[in-house]
Image (cartoon, rainbow, N blue to C red):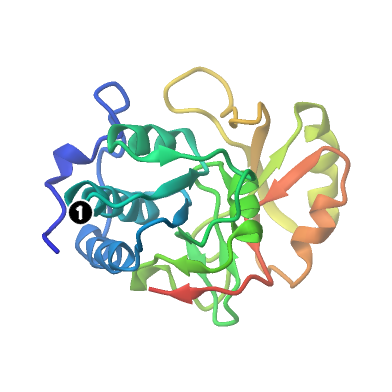
């Protein structure tokens, strides 16, 4: 299949001019072409968030349009939903159907296959996708593989506004080296997720197995960006 269009055409829509720039774009384009080659007529495909999954969505949309395939997509963020609409893809609400397969990216991947995700703040919807899809493909470039989780990015935690104070105290008990409420770039104040919650980014010197479950047991915590126990195939 042909090469993806130049960067300027990758905007989700005329109004939503995202993404502005994509790191390691050439490697992610290669992964996107592999994902598009997996598409079969009549499939329902789950689309995660982040630039790697986004480029895969774009490559899939171009192939569907070129070959006239009947494909439905399940999206996990406003950005991917808007892009799917721009590409003319039929969208199915998350949780309505079991996708034949899904594709998602990650910020970090450790040697045990655990993932750190959530820079886009969509980890709650992404975990629904990962749990409901029959098979998941991981779209990452080599820079995402790390010796241990948390080397480059904090652990995102989606929390109800009323639970922020409780989470702050609990993070101290769980050995967090630092934590802060994620602040928005295009508005004053904190980032608000699509579920109306806040995101706390917590840094840990070590991230033990089971930390996500311990944090989620706290009242007010909706989800974390630690993905453990999921099976997937790396593209």
Residue 97 can be seen, yes or no: yes
Q: Where is residue 105 in the image (x, y as percent from the top left)?
A: 45, 59
Which quarter of the rendering shows the C terminus?
bottom left
Along the horizontal axis of the image, is 167 left or right of 65? right
Q: Quadrant of residue 39?
A: bottom left
CA neighbours of label 1 inside 10 A, class few (<14), some (14 to 19), many (20+) = few
Q: Residue at x 29, y 32 (%)?
A: 86
**Secondary structure of the residue carrying numbered label 1:** helix
Furthest residue toward bottom: 111
Foreground of the two, 37 or 108: 37
Q: Quadrant of residue 204?
A: bottom right
In the rendered image, the vertical position of residue 198 relative to residue 230, given as above or below: above
Along the horizontal axis of the image, is 214 left or right of 147? right
Give the number of marks: 1
Furthest residue toward top: 188
Q: Residue at x 28, y 38 (%)?
A: 87
Foreground of the two, 108 or 14: 14
Foreground of the two, 34 or 44: 44
In the rendered image, the vertical position of residue 153 relative to residue 193, given as above or below: below
Q: Where is residue 227 in the image (x, y as percent from the top left)?
A: 64, 63
In the rendered image, the vertical position of residue 136 relative to residue 20, given as above or below: below
Q: Residue at x 15, y 38 (%)?
A: 8
Residue 201 can be seen, yes or no: no
Which quarter of the rendering shows the N terminus?
bottom left
Q: Name the residue under label 1.
A: 67
Q: Position of residue 15 (x, y in %)?
A: 29, 21
Q: Which residue is drawn at 52% across and 43% down?
A: 76
């Amino acid at each position: 299949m042909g090469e993806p269009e130049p960067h300027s055409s990758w905007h989700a829509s005329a109004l939503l001019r995202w993404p502005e720039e994509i790191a390691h774009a050439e490697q992610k384009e290669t992964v996107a072409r592999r994902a598009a080659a997996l598409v079969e007529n009549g499939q329902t495909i789950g689309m995660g968030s982040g630039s790697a999954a986004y480029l895969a969505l774009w490559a899939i949309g171009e192939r569907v349009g070129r070959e006239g395939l009947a494909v439905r997509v399940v999206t996990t963020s406003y950005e991917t939903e808007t892009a799917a609409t721009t590409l003319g893809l039929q969208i199915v609400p998350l949780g309505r159907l079991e996708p034949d397969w899904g594709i998602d990216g990650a910020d970090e991947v450790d040697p045990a296959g655990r993932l750190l995700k959530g820079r886009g703040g969509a980890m709650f919807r992404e975990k629904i996708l990962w749990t409901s899809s029959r098979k998941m493909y991981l779209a990452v470039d080599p820079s995402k593989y790390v010796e241990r989780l948390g080397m480059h990015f904090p652990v995102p935690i989606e929390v109800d506004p009323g639970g922020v104070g409780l989470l702050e105290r609990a993070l101290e008990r769980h050995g967090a080296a630092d934590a802060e409420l994620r602040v928005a770039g295009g508005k004053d104040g904190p980032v608000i997720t699509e579920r109306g919650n806040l995101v706390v980014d917590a840094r840990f010197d070590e991230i033990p197995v089971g930390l996500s479950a311990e944090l989620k047991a706290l009242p007010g915590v909706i989800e974390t960006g630690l993905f453990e126990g999921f099976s997937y195939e790396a593209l």
